Image (tube, rainbow, N blue to C red):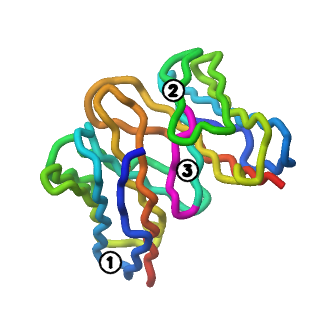
Amino acid sequence: GQSLEQPSEVTAVEGAIVQINCTYQTSGFYGLSWYQQHDGGAPTFLSYNALDGLEETGRFSSFLSRSDSYGYLLLQELQMKDSASYFCAVNFLDDYKLSFGAGTTVTVRA
Amino acid sequence: DVKVTQSSRYLVKRTGEKVFLECVQDMDHENMFWYRQDPGLGLRLIYFSYDVKMKEKGDIPEGYSVSREKKERFSLILESASTNQTSMYLCASSRASPGAPYGYTFGSGTRLTVV
């Protein structure tokens, strides 16, 4: 698999902003995606970056910089329901399988 | 609502047993995948399939096999279960289409305990 590094845990209060970085040791991938997984649940797709720059979906945004070999997921206006694990993943052109990072557990406190 | 369904939510099996984990998707997706998820290790790819009767090894195929006789069904087989195969197993499917965005739909997982 590919090497994707994420922080293991992040804690923040309701209403705050959290940035989860994903740095990678591989090049030439087609896209970087993010998944959310609540405890005991299935991972669900959040966002996908094929091009450098920012993709915004409501309170969540994702960013990719290939020249800096990193991306991030930005969670704004944190809510208690955002407490979950977040995974970054990459796929390559003409290859549909995803390689995942180890995940970041986000805990939102009141 | 589109769905990936895994046949069991929890399973307990004995060492040496042959174990079948079933996954069915109703989205007519071409691609199907089996991952295992362990704390601190994220999701690791076991096997995948891009077409009926086609299978390819992922990163950790040892001790596992798969079967895809129909497009909607992808089975993971543990030939002789061992305690180090105790894990959460996740099935996923995706469409084979070019371009972004690209994403998986996951099943809810099967938590397998081998005793």
Quadrant, the N terminus of chain A: top left
What is the secondary structure assignment of the residue under circle 2? loop
Above/below status of A65 relative to A15: above
Above/below status of A6 relative to B3: below
Q: Chain of mark 3?
A: A
Residue type at numbered disc 2: Met
Q: Is residue A60 visible?
A: no
Q: Give the alpha-carbon distance from disc 1 to disc 2, as whole Å.
A: 37 Å
Q: Report the span colored magenta.
A: B39-47
Q: Nearer the viewer, residue A80 or B41?
A: B41
* Residue in the picture at 42% in, 27% down: B95
Say yes or no: labels 3 and 1 on the same chain. Answer: yes
The label number, if any, that marks residue A15 in the structure image: 1
* Residue in the picture at 82% in, 36% down: B18
What is the secondary structure assignment of the residue under circle 3? loop
Q: Nearer the viewer, residue A34 or B39?
A: B39
Residue type at numbered disc 1: Gly
Task: Give the labeled residue for mark 3.
Answer: A42
B94 lies left or right of A65 = right
Q: Nearer the viewer, residue A102 or B74?
A: A102
Residue B63, quarter of the rendered image = top right
* Residue in the picture at 59% in, 57% down: B38
